[in-house]
Image: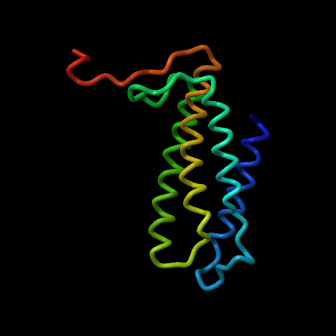
Amino acid sequence: MQSTLQLLQHELFDLGAELALPGSAQNKDVWRVTHEWTFRLEQEMDRMSQDLSPLTQFILPGGSLVAAQAHVVRTLTRRCERQVVMLGEHERLNPALLPYLNRLSDWFFVLARWLIRCEGLREVIWQKESERK
């Protein structure tokens, strides 16, 4: 897992370098993010999901410190995705950026679930207000 997280850090630096360029400089020659990155994330999610029960209810972020941290990263990635959507309304961007960010946030969600499972803990299931009384 450590090597995967380190790879993601490298990829995010590449992504940041792309976003640092003005729209006028955006072209295939400077784009590093690829659809293959997104495909790899999907494959990794599939592998982690093999050990997980299907989701039939909403879960609360948390369950353990490391899972909670994965959920925080997931929400930060979603925020970045929204910012890139807005940037794309005004600047030319690599078409592989948004799918990658979208799947990356999903990857962190699956990672959080997988970490809970590895720790032998249970996910915290959201209960409706009427069920909490």
Place residue 15 in its image quadrant: bottom right
What scheme was used to colour the molecule?
Answer: rainbow
Work out which residue is located at the far right of the displayed protein and give it. 3
* Residue 84 x/y as whole percent: 51, 65
Residue 1 sits above or below residue 82 on the image: above
Residue 13 located left or right of residue 97: right
* Residue 34 x/y as whole percent: 69, 62
Question: What residue is drawn where x is 54% and y is 37%?
Answer: 109
* Residue 10 x/y as whole percent: 75, 54
Residue 13 sits above or below residue 112 on the image: below
Question: What residue is drawn where x is 60% and y is 80%?
Answer: 22
Residue 20 located left or right of residue 82: right
* Residue 57 x/y as whole percent: 38, 26
Place residue 117 in its image quadrant: top right
Question: What residue is drawn where x is 66% and y is 70%?
Answer: 18
Quadrant (top left, top right, bottom left, bottom right) of the C terminus: top left
Question: What residue is drawn where x is 63% and y is 38%?
Answer: 45
Work out which residue is located at the far bottom of the displayed protein and give it. 24
Residue 24 located left or right of residue 14: left
- How many labels, in total? 0
